[in-house]
Image (spheres, grey):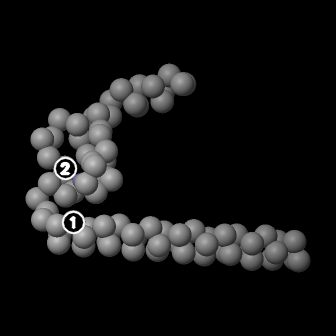
Amino acid sequence: MPLGRAVWHSMQPKRKKCDRCNLYSRENLDKCRWCGDLDEQGLALLRERIEHQHQSNKSLGRLFIVLAVITALLIVLM
Ligand SMILES: [Zn+2]
């Protein structure tokens, strides 16, 4: 690992993955910052929101690929 990255890593708070919601929160917290205060219904909503976000990130990624291809075509054609 390069030194800069190692330093950056050592400065980050230790994080652990939550078994309930699969999100990461700080290890020194006694409950998950995402789902610690949620009941089952709240957790279901949180999961839905995460899934929705993943979907929009994917379509945003696709949009950027399309824009990159169009830009490349324009450069080649001009
Ligand atoms: Zn959680």
Q: Quadrant of the C terminus?
A: bottom right
Q: Nearer the viewer, residue 34 or 3?
A: 34
Q: Is mark 1 within 8 Å of ligand 1?
A: yes
Q: Amino acid at mark 2?
A: Cys
Between the residue at mark 1 and the residue at mark 2, the CA separation in whole angstroms equals 12 Å
Which residue was labeled with disc 2?
32
Assign a secondary structure to mark 2. Answer: loop
Which residue position holds label 1?
Answer: 43
Amino acid at pointer 1: Leu
- In the image, the residue with mark 2 has its CB under 8 Å from the nearest atom of ligand 1: yes
- In the rendered image, residue 16, in percent from the top left (x then y), is placed at 29, 40
As drawn, the label of residue 21 is none
Judged left or right of residue 6, residue 61 is right
Q: Position of residue 33 (x, y in %)?
A: 19, 52
State the residue lying farthest toward the right. Answer: 77
Task: Mark 1: give few (<14), some (14-19) or many (20+) Cα within 10 Å.
Answer: some
Q: Quick one: SS at disc 1?
A: helix
Q: Which badge, 1 or 2, is on the more N-terminal residue?
A: 2
